[in-house]
Image (tube, rainbow, N blue to C red):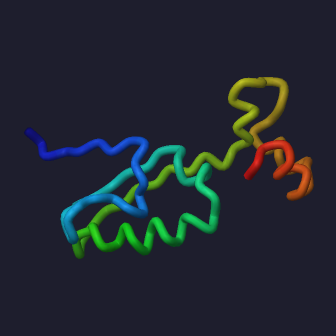
Amino acid sequence: MANIYYLALADAANANLLNNSIDYYISTNVLEHIPYEFLKNIFIKGKRILKYKVITIHFIDLSDHFQHKDNSIGRINFLLFSDNDWTNIAGN
């Protein structure tokens, strides 16, 4: 009735949508899980489906996700580790 389509678990870089057909899109706690090398492609290809005047909203949770299950560590616990160590622990 409201012409809203919810696309979860979809490939944003290869969305099968018409050109200039999207008024707005929202992502919540998604982009921080996508490897950097794929993000640029998602936004470049995604631009095709967006109307000229569009609203996009992206909430990115920059906290240490391990903290969500373990109250003994802080939201920025990941800063205690080198980039190499963090990659080995968390994979991103």
At a point 78% along the width and 44% down the height, the residue shown is 90
Quadrant the N terminus occupies: top left
Give residue 58's position: percent from left, percent from top. 46, 54
Q: Is residue 60 above or below residue 36?
A: above
Q: In the picture provided, is 73 more to the left or to the right than 21?
A: right
Q: Is residue 31 above or below residue 89?
A: below
Q: Residue at x 77, y 24 (%)?
A: 71
Comparing 1 with 55, the one in front is 1
Looking at the image, how many numbered discs can be counted on the residues?
Answer: 0
Q: Picture quarter containing residue 54?
A: bottom left
Which residue lies at the image location 74% right of the left edge and 41% below the top edge? 64
Q: Position of residue 78 (x, y in %)?
A: 82, 46
Residue at the spot 38% in from the left edge and 51% down from the top edge: 26
Q: Quadrant of residue 16?
A: bottom left
Q: Residue 16 or 8: which is nearer the viewer? A: 16
- The quarter of the displayed image where residue 43 is located: bottom left
Q: Is residue 74 left or right of residue 44?
A: right
- Measured as percent of width and height from the top left, residue 3 is found at 13, 46
Q: Is residue 22 left or right of residue 92?
A: left
